Amino acid sequence: MAFDEYQKREFKQVGTRPNRPDGVDKVTGRAMYGADMTLPGMLIGRILRSPHAHAKIKSIDASAALALKGVKAVVTGDDFARPEDDFLRDVQENCMARGKALYDGHAVAAVAAIDAATAKAALKLIKVEYEILPHVTDVDAAMKAGAPIVQEGRTLENVPAGMSGNVTSHSEFGHGDPAAGFAKADKVVERSFKTAATHQGYIEPHAAVASVTTDGKADLWCCTQGHFFVRTLCAGMMGMEASQLRVTPSEIGGGFGGKTTVFIEPVALMLSRKAGRPVKVVMTRDEVFRATGPTVSTSIDVKIGMTKDGRITAGEAYLRYSGGAFPCGTIDMGGQAAFAAYDLEHVRTYGWNVLTNRPKEAAYRAPGAPQAIYAVESVVDELCLALKLDPLDVRLKNAAKKGTKSSYGPTFPDIGLVATLEAAKKHPHYTAPLAEGQARGLSCGFWFNFGGNTCVSLNVNTDGTVGITEGNPDIGGSRASVSLMAAEELGIPYEQIRTIVADTNSLGYNDVTDGSRVTFAVGLATIKAARDAVRKMCLRAAKIWDIDEEAVEWKDGAAVPAGPNAGRFPPMTLAEIAADSFATGGPIAGHHEVNVDGAGVSFGVHLVDVEVDRDTGATKVLRYTIFQDAGKAVHPDYVEGQMQGGAVQGIGWALNEEYIYGRDGRLQNAGFLDYRIPVASDLPPIETVILEIPNPGHPYGVRGVGETPIVPPLAAISNAVSRAIGTRMCELPMSPPRILKAIGTTA
Amino acid sequence: MKKLHVSTTVNGDPAEFVCTPDESLLDALRNRLGLTGAKEGCGTGDCGACSVTVNGRLVCSCLVLAAEAEGAEIATIEGMAEQDRLHPLQRAFIDHAALQCGVCTPGILVAAKSLLAKNPEPTDEEVRYWLAGNLCRCTGYDKIIRAVQSAAAEMRGA
């Protein structure tokens, strides 16, 4: 265990800001993303999607499409075997409907043809006979008695009897007796909130190229956050053995959780198998919005009691999440995260997942947490206003710290929330004067962070350089941070290391790039692979010097005798040992395989100043500062980048972004013009303050930083807007029409 | 559909391709000429990932017909570096970590170069408004603005 545990040390390279190894490829247009791959004889695949929110598929007649010159294959749900596993079956039915179309945009058939124009023409020739069914897209409406049932028989046993058949699961977390806690409060506030579904909004649409050969082997290139998981899912659906399906990740043009599953990949494989040729499928932006992603949409009630001096006596939350047309476990993470920032005697959350006729939820940065924490942090802010208390002082007074029994069960080890709040309090932003009509808001944020299955190989080349093979797509600079950690451990320059992301046949299983796990878990495995290589290099030195292995240690990139008794030998550098390796036992490589435990939770605090235009209802973000505990910032540029990017996604969620459904159950804004993500001119600079409270579960103290920054903006901005207009806002996004309604003006 | 023959210039070199009359310049660059640096993020001119210049004018190549390239001078991300020397903007983007996933980067670089050609000393606000047509979902734009300003200063010899 000793290697796992954090040990204080002086870093030489970790914490510096070298250039990323994939930088030149990405600024010159050479980097190959999902849609950039081409194979000989490749066909183009397109997907036909349901125009109805909910409809029985009575028949599909593809004969006219197949008769069109240049069409080589048609695929429908019937081409896939029906997996026994519920999870796999849901993913498959989301990729290609069977029997029923469950949302506007649900795939019902696909074609492969010699070019895009022919494929597009063929889609129009596929005749689908639908029987339109009543639909429901709102989470509260879907819970009502008599609501259309999206899927029958999906309710788990833990759902109380008498609820709508759309309720699939129930969860409860917490401890103590909230009723007793509320009785001790001087003020209790209870509020109901709604948050719209939002999309990850990665700029690169999903893309896949599949090549299935007649001997049953297959290659798949796709943009994904986790190619090993893609292999698991696709092999399951295709009835293939994992060894025969090699998945190679392309460069990935953003994911944020949305590329942790499959949509078009099994379709491309099936088209290729039927056509006997490689097939490329690339989604349009319209398809991305209608059929991938979004977050849960939610309806939340929160009740919090507080004493006059700002102590929270109890908290309760009722969370209703809809993950679309399939059962979804995100509610559990919302329930666990809701009160995580607080040290509470009495706390309880109740959660329900609800089916609606919307696309299947996919993870989006800290899935489930932003919504729940938005509701809690809004009520805390309302209590601070009512009791005339400083919102940072109240959070400091109630902050979770080392030894706190968290609202979701575990007792926290060293965590950084108090340090983060104190940094915010000291920062000039917190006391900067505000002009008339401007207001300041703040919120805490939290994410668990994940570890997971990880496998890394580290090869020592004979010229003294090092190649690292890892299995997690680099979504924002992780090749740089992995190289930095290896350089630190080996004691060689960063520039002498090259880290690549390998395909599924080159390495053992690696979990998906998600949960802020890569710098933490892949970093840990890299450090240990480096230590494995170091041990082997010490052995080689011992052999050359003819002394005991134990008498050799590694220092500053070289083997040295461990002490005066070990003998007197000059240091033998990594390059020297590597150059001799063929004569001393052959190539040198380090490996590490592990299911990483010990992820350290991450807290952040965001401060924001806003100004609301009372005529238009538009909110301008004037100043934004992020404080977050990174554990250890391995490459601070990319830590800041995660913090800034996550915050801006949260700003979009707070102010603009939402899935808007018409009465017909169709998505009305499936494009970047109408689903408006923040653009450069919407924003101020995003200032970042990195705190480093080491995670005891990582050798360098790394926690992971990607998820937490999307959590606080929702409440921070809502609190600022509510203070600016003098009315508590309880619905996201706070788009201009909602603001105008709140201040009593009509648009 | 009968195809059209197009003679054009791409990044200073002569180029020829055939295309359908309804084909976009982006599709022709990517699928006919193999220049996949320009990306399709939306196909509707909203994201700017396909930005190129046509006769010096910044356009979304998804909104330009390939046939319009006849006789024109097209510049794409693949032509931004000179031989083995990166353009100052390209270097600044790497030095300032102004990219994460990098898929919007080619379009943003082409757009930023076009800005600096017109306005060598823009304010931050001018940079933000010029790049408002280029969506980036990873960075929050902060480091992009800094990188553009750093390159602008270098190009001015400051």
Image (cartoon, rainbow, N blue to C red):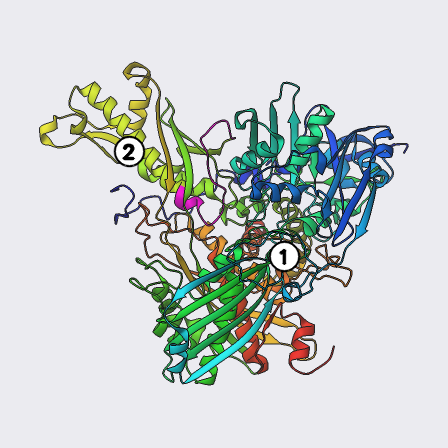
N-terminal-most mark, 1 or 2? 1
Quick check: A50 above or below A190?
A: above
Majority SS type along the magenta span:
loop
Q: Secondary structure at mark 2?
A: loop
For discs 1 and 2, the disc positioned in front in the rendered view = 1
Quick check: A340 above or below A432?
A: above
Label 2: few (<14), some or many (≥20) within 10 Å?
some
Let me know if residue A41 is in the magenta part: no
Q: Is residue A63 left or right of residue A686?
A: right
Dot label at residue A557: 2
Dot label at residue A355: 1
As rendered, which of A185 and A260 lies closer to the eye? A185
As rendered, which of A312 and A163 lies closer to the eye? A163
Label 1: few (<14), some or many (≥20) within 10 Å?
many
Magenta span of residues: A504-521
Looking at the figure, which quarter contains the C terminus of chain A? bottom right
Measured Cα–Cα span from mark 1 to mark 2: 57 Å
Dot label at residue A215: none
Residue B135 in the image: state x and y as whole percent. Answer: 64, 53
